[in-house]
Amino acid sequence: MSAFSTSPGTRDILAPDAARWRLFQEVFADVVEQAGYGYMIPPMFEDLGVFLRLGEATDVVTKEMYDFEDKGGRRVALRPEQTASVCRAFVQHRPTTPWKVWYAGPNFRYEKPQQGRYRQFDQVGIEVLGVEDPHLDAEVIALASQFYTRLGLTNVQLSINSLGDAGDRQRFADVLRIYFESHIDRLSEESRITLTKNPLRVLDSKRREDQAVIADAPRIRDYLSAQAGEHFAAVLAALDAQNITYTIDDRLVRGLDYYRRTTFEFVSTALTAAHTAIGGGGRYDGLVEELGGPATAGIGFALGLDRTLLACDAENVFPAPASRVFAFVVDTTGGLEAAKVCHELRSVGIGVDRAFDGRSMKAQMKAADRSGAMVSIIIGTNELEAGQVLIRPMNSGEQYMVERAQLLTAIRQEVINFQ
RNA sequence: GUGGGCGUAGCUCAGUUGGUUAGAGCGCCAGGUUGUGGUCCUGGAGGCCGGGGGUUCGAGACCCCUCGUCCACCCCA
């Protein structure tokens, strides 16, 4: 087979699923714009340096970047996520704070593809720059939670943790390193390698042999500074006040190095595969500074479209939107009348489709059925000669004749009947 | 990146210890119903059995390589 097909980790999203994707983004826009977030469209590729700030120890940067040199000799990369781009944009444009933005679109990571993990994958997300208030942390989390509710998801669990300030995080990492090194004989080989790069990440290991050691590991909560501890307590209190349930997870250590203080993750318990994390985020105070801007607090989250939709499938919610074709024209007189009817109805906002290629009435009726149309408009030689059309609601056995001139009025009545 | 499973029609899959013209269901097209879909009946189109090499008189079945996909690890959304 020499025909082309999509590259590994990419795919075509066809109807009706593509319509579902678009609706997903529209619902998201509705939830966050109502909270004052503005839509932002960052470029899909940037100077490689923008993304290198995500952390020297993250796989996203070291192993998975789609980077290349363009024809002008610039070192650029397809964005692996959008937080860094938002921060770069903040430094570049210096908007007034608080700067609340949302985005949607594809990101690129060179990973081995699996279900729920693609090389081109879509996310929606929000970011807020310039606010340290713990109430904002809670607002950000609440919006994600509200969005899941709007989709109809109920089996979503929120895990939350605090990684402390930069100093706390470093101190804890040192303590962890010492702890794990003293138990290194009980760690898996993979975790020993992880330990040398980022001790925090060992806490994330899912390998069975590591679990006992991890269970007894020091806990970040014991190493939080007073301010970080207070901040975390305030976030939890604000979540309580909004009736958002959560689980404090001491082992929640997210993979991007820039996270500070609050980190959180949403897991779908309806999914059975390994990729149950359908969304996550946290604070990244310091990232703007890394990118050459002023010291600025930042927080946000990103939700994966694919995985969230998989969760929707598993819960049987958020189906693809219905057909927008209200009427289907069946014309056995050559098709010219169908053309006129389609134009007439479409121009007043009524969805209409028709058949082509002079197919038999039976075939056209079949097409009408498949189109999802509520009514079919039938025009045969008798109708054409009499200056009439036959209207047939698809879900009933009844059909009736109207004068051609009354077609629009009749269809409008049918629209009302179906509302 | 590491390890493993699987690639047969548009889709979901069957193909007995290697044996001649490769099957089903669904979908699609047509007819039964020369003016009627969603049910039913009949027929039809559609496959270099992922690709390449090898073993054999003979390979969809066996071996090697390769590509793709899925699962676990890893990573993360």
Image (tube, rainbow, N blue to C red):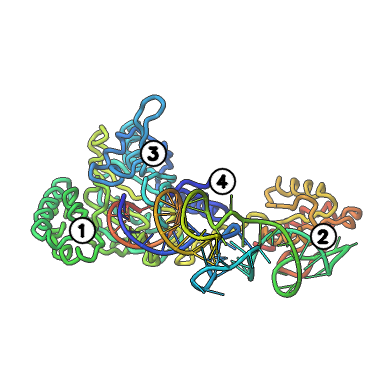
Q: Chain of mark 2?
A: A
Residues marked 1 and 3, same chain: yes
Q: Chain of mark 3?
A: A
The quarter in which the C terminus of chain A is drawn is: bottom right
Mark 3 lies on residue:
A78
Residues marked 2 and 3, same chain: yes
Mark 4 lies on residue:
A3
Give coordinates of residue B23: x percent, y percent.
Answer: 64, 68
Instruction: Please identify, in this view, whether the residue under mark 2 or under mark 3 is nearer the observer.
Output: 3
Give coordinates of residue A244: x percent, y percent.
Answer: 32, 62
In the image, taking residue B21 as reference, residue A331 lies left or right, namely right
- For the residue pair A298 and A35, the one nearer the viewer reads as A298
Residue A82 visible in rendering? yes
Give coordinates of residue A16: x percent, y percent.
Answer: 57, 55
Q: Earlier in the sequence, mark 1 or mark 3?
A: 3
The reply to whether callout 1 and callout 2 are in contact (CB within 8 Å) is: no
Instruction: Please identify, in this view, whether the residue under mark 2 or under mark 4 is nearer the observer.
Output: 4
Q: Chain of mark 4?
A: A
The reply to whether callout 4 and callout 1 are in contact (CB within 8 Å) is: no
Residue type at tag 3 = Leu
Mark 1 lies on residue:
A203
- For the residue pair A309 and B62, the one nearer the viewer reads as B62
Mark 2 lies on residue:
A390
Residue type at tag 4 = Ala
Residue type at tag 2 = Leu
The reply to whether callout 2 and callout 3 are in contact (CB within 8 Å) is: no
